[in-house]
Amino acid sequence: MSTSARSSLVIVGAGLAGVRAAESARNAGHDGSIVLVGAETALPYERPQVTKEALLAGASPRHYVEHDQLVGRLGVQLRLGTRATGLDRRRRLLRTSDGKIGYDALVVATGAQPTPCPWGNLDGQVSTVRTARDAVLLHRVLTGRRRVVVVGAGLIGSEIASAAQALGAEVTLVERGCGPLEASHGRSLAEHLARLHRTAGTRLVTGAAVNSLVRAGASVAVDLGSGERIVAEHVVWAVGVRSDLGWLVGSGIRVAEGVLCTTAMVTNDPAVFVAGDAAQVVATDGPQAAPRSMSQSMAAAQGLVAGHNAVTPPGSWSRTTATPYFWSTWYDRRIQGVGVPSARSTVLQEGGGTLHLYEHRGRLTGAVGIDAKASVRRVRELLREGSSSGAHAAREMTGRPA
Amino acid sequence: MSAFELDSSRCEGHGVCVDAAPHLLALDDEGELVLLAETFGDADADAAADAALVCPVAALRVVGPGEASS
Ligand SMILES: Cc1cc2nc3c(=O)[nH]c(=O)nc-3n(C[C@H](O)[C@H](O)[C@H](O)COP(=O)(O)OP(=O)(O)OC[C@H]3O[C@@H](n4cnc5c(N)ncnc54)[C@H](O)[C@@H]3O)c2cc1C
Ligand code: SF4
């Protein structure tokens, strides 16, 4: 396949989506250069371990691909520790903290960053968690502290609470809803997940808003809307993420919460593609776009499509069809979500685990399992086959109604 | 002929790869990934390459003919 028209591929962001885009471009026959620009200095590493093994051990997570593979086998020029600062689309130039880089095709894979704490970091007593460095620092902090408050009981906040517990801290988890994932997955799952925290000994405060964070000597006081004051030695702010795309302002690339793209992962500029947490797919070109799903498997699947399409003519472009999927591990329990949630759910017991099945107008749309690997696998198969009703799925499962 | 190389220390049985190549890969009842064929030919190369790239933990790799496993 000729790729001479797209001889230089530049990928911004050296996370999973960026690495996959590079591999996929090579698989598609791209024999031009590939430059991987990443703000972090580390080789791309397993981000999920930042709040799992790496946080527990205080060590950096493993790399996805070792240096030799990336540079030798894939022929990638690494520009780590380099941040993209602007884009000149007319001259096809990426501006970076370390000079300009010309491109024929560009893939934006800059991920997402934690929403900052509105009261700042109070001299290091409040932190957010995204990177390997954050994990190593937080491990040190948690190991020495007695009382920790984690604000936000989403997947990341819940994992941090679980790790802090395991490291011997006394944990209070503050959540706006009635439990984890209420906004996306509904009350029944949220209540179930809330019980996981409480059973494990984490104090979970629900329906709570943080009014202010203030220094109180060597501690931090967290004031809640209810009037309650929680005093702790450290606070982790984990209320969500947002994509920091300020460097694209003025470039003409359309950005909303993420970089807007079609299911071919192309932006409004046919030379600029996007993948992973930075992407926001809009359904202008297909029957239905998957909801913005910030997960490893979306980053991988979108990186694959973006890398392929960036180096091939539009006639042979592929599109993302991946089923959304995430997992999370708290207190040694495995939570897995496949497909998309919807308003109606059925709860089944399976061995020691539980499965929440979601259906819309009688059709299975997705499920969340807690220690229910086999059922989650079966739901994935049913979604792949594409025709299953919720009731059929429920009968299929080995379990019984809860 | 090419082959899959599975890093079993990384594979967590997510089964995402199975969706991309259900005729080459499967999960067993314990949720362990099973390679249905030791090697595969050109006809399956694209599906296999995609299966390797969609793995969310980078546990699966395709090794080409004659490539030594590392
Ligand atoms: C702590 C944590 C735990 C998680 N656990 C799970 C899990 O268990 N399961 C799951 O499915 N998902 C999990 N996720 C979500 C998943 O890791 C993300 O969806 C995935 O990392 C997205 O990959 P990405 O390549 O798009 O972005 P990222 O991994 O965020 O990589 C983007 C990279 O781009 C760099 N960058 C940003 N801006 C610039 C710039 N201007 N110039 C150059 N480089 C830049 C960033 O520094 C970063 O290194 C977790 C996320 C976090 C933070
Ligand atoms: S290889 Fe990857 S996608 Fe396949 S089962 Fe293992 S972890 Fe899951």
Image (cartoon, coloured by chain):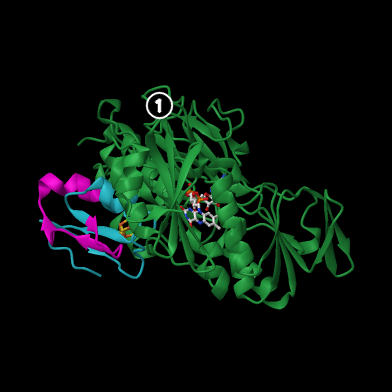
Residue A136 visible here:
no
The range drawn in magenta is B26-49
Residue shown at the point (40%, 33%) measured from the top left:
A265
- Residue hosting label 1: A270
Q: Is residue A193 above or below residue A387?
A: below
Place of residue A27 in the rendered image (x, y in percent of width and height, measured from the top left): 25, 46
| Dot 1 alpha-carbon crowd within 10 angstroms: few under 14, some 14 to 19, many 20 or more | few
Residue A103, picture quadrant? top left
Say which colour chain B has: cyan
- Point out residue A258 in the picture as x, y percentages from the top left corner: 55, 35
A257 or A187, nearer to the observer: A187
Residue farthest toward the front in the current orientation of the protein = A401
* Residue shown at the point (45%, 26%) measured from the top left: A269
Residue A390: quarter of image: top left
Left or right: residue A353 versus residue A86 is left
Where residue A50 sits, quadrant-wise, is bottom right
Instruction: Point out residue A169 in the picture as x, y percentages from the top left corner.
Output: 69, 73
Q: For residue B37: magenta?
A: yes
Q: Position of residue A183 (x, y in %)?
A: 60, 41
* Residue at figure coordinates x 29%, y 65% from the top left: B30
Q: Secondary structure at mark 1?
A: loop
Which chain gets the green colouring? A
Which quadrant of the figure contains the N terminus of chain A? top left
- Please report, as a chain letter, where disc 1 is located: A
Residue A259 located left or right of residue A315 = right
Task: Name which residue type carries label 1.
Answer: Pro
| Closer to the camera in the image, A292 or A402 | A402
User: Is A36 placed left or right of A219 in the picture?
Assistant: left
Q: Work out whether residue A15 or residue A393 is closer to the camera in this orientation and state it.
A: A393
Residue A262 position (above or below residue A27): above
Q: Quadrant of ligand 2?
A: bottom left
